[in-house]
Amino acid sequence: MSLLITIKSALVVFGIFVSAHLLLCRLTGSSFFMLKSILLGFVTTLSLLGYQIYNNQINLVGIYIFISGWLLYLIFFINLLNSVTLKMLDYLDSSNHKRLCQNEFENAFNTQNGLERRIDLMIKNRFLLIQGDKLYLTRKALILLGAISAISQPLSLPLN
Amino acid sequence: MTNYARIHEVGIENLCIYGAVIFFVLFLAIIIGKKSAAKQSTYTAVNTIHFRIMLIYISTVFIIALLENSINFNFFIGIMVGLFIYLSLHYVFLFSLIGLCRKSISVSILISARKILEGGKSIETAELIKEMKFKGLDTTGLRNSRLEQMTYLGFATSDGNLYVISWFGRAINKIAKLIINVYGLKRL
């Protein structure tokens, strides 16, 4: 398969994925956003692979273009929904004179809606387990921490 | 097109694609060897090396294509795909992983929790927030670092204490809100 046809087919599949994702989000809202997006991406990748196998034209470049496009799209949405910087930018934009002093950003990001909210979300997403007033790291959290150590050590990346 | 011409064309495309992967592996070897990610400004150090290797990659495939008399449409398609692979391997995969390790608040919370456990204490929300504060990752520290980022990205201007939104910041915020509305999503 020529490279140009590979690019075209990967872009068509990516377009179908974006349309399906948009429809899914419109119908189901923000809940389980990551899970839905990852599952839809997997199903689309498998469909693309299945299509290539059916036509006896397996092309890893096409699969790679789609997967990296899908991950880039996911990263974009993760930042759009979770970024503290964007949240503070929105707060600044909605202020009366479009200008704020440093301490006025307290309402946009404080302990209650910042760290405590994150901790609550991590409990909800089963990274932390709460029993009484004590918190425990779950198996899921330990796997994530293990993966982060495995990435950071060879790169000599300091962790915060 | 003759079989020879087709084989030659595929050869140039493969050179661009496999060349991108080989040069990315070279880049990885250099940042691991030089411990570039350990530097204070991780992103600048890593991105500078990535950019330099990219220039070497482009020059190498261009010279080979020139020597092989293969500067044609297929070569340009090949180099575009090669550049996409080289850039995406960095910005989609490696850069995101570095960002996750360095910037993610949730990951910092988990690391702090593990540190408290290793110290033989039990984890409580107040203890966790205290540990985050010790690392300069308390609410004020995080807020100030994000304000700095906002001015660095040109979203706002600052005279030290007063922050004024720029036209670019307003445009970015409008686009972000439009996308969120179109998808029917809510921010964290």
Image (spheres, coloured by chain):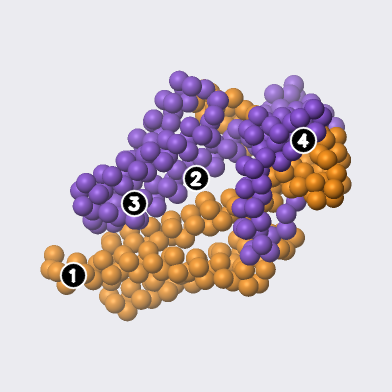
Chain colours: A purple, B orange
Residue at x-position 53% and y-position 35%: A34
Q: Within 10 Å of the Cα at label 1, are there few (<14), some (14-19), or many (20+) other Cα atoms?
A: few
In the displayed structure, A73 sits above or below B64; it is above
- Residue picked out by circle 3: A62
Residue at x-position 35% and y-position 43%: A46
From mark 3 to mark 2, how far is it between C-alphas?
Answer: 15 Å
Residue A44 percent coordinates (x, y): 37, 39
The amino acid on which the numbered mark 2 sits, given as a three-letter code, is Leu
Residue B75 percent coordinates (x, y): 31, 65
Residue at x-position 80% and y-position 27%: A132
Q: Is residue B15 left or right of residue B161?
A: left
Per the rendering, the mark at residue B5 is 1
Query: Are the residues under badges 3 and 4 in a single subunit?
Result: yes
Query: Are the residues under badges 3 and 2 in a single subunit?
Result: yes
- Residue picked out by circle 4: A135
Q: Give me the chain letter of mark 2.
A: A
From mark 1 to mark 2, how far is it between C-alphas?
Answer: 36 Å
Query: Are the residues under badges 4 and 2 in a single subunit?
Result: yes
From mark 3 to mark 1, how far is it between C-alphas?
Answer: 23 Å
Q: Nearer the viewer, mark 3 or mark 4?
A: 4
Residue B50 percent coordinates (x, y): 56, 64
- Residue picked out by circle 2: A72
The answer, for residue A114, to whether it is visible in the render is no
Per the rendering, the mark at residue A106 is none
Q: Locate the N terminus of chain B and report the quarter of the image it occupies.
A: bottom left
Residue B138, quarter of picture:
top right
- Give the total of numbered labels: 4
Secondary structure at badge 1 equals helix
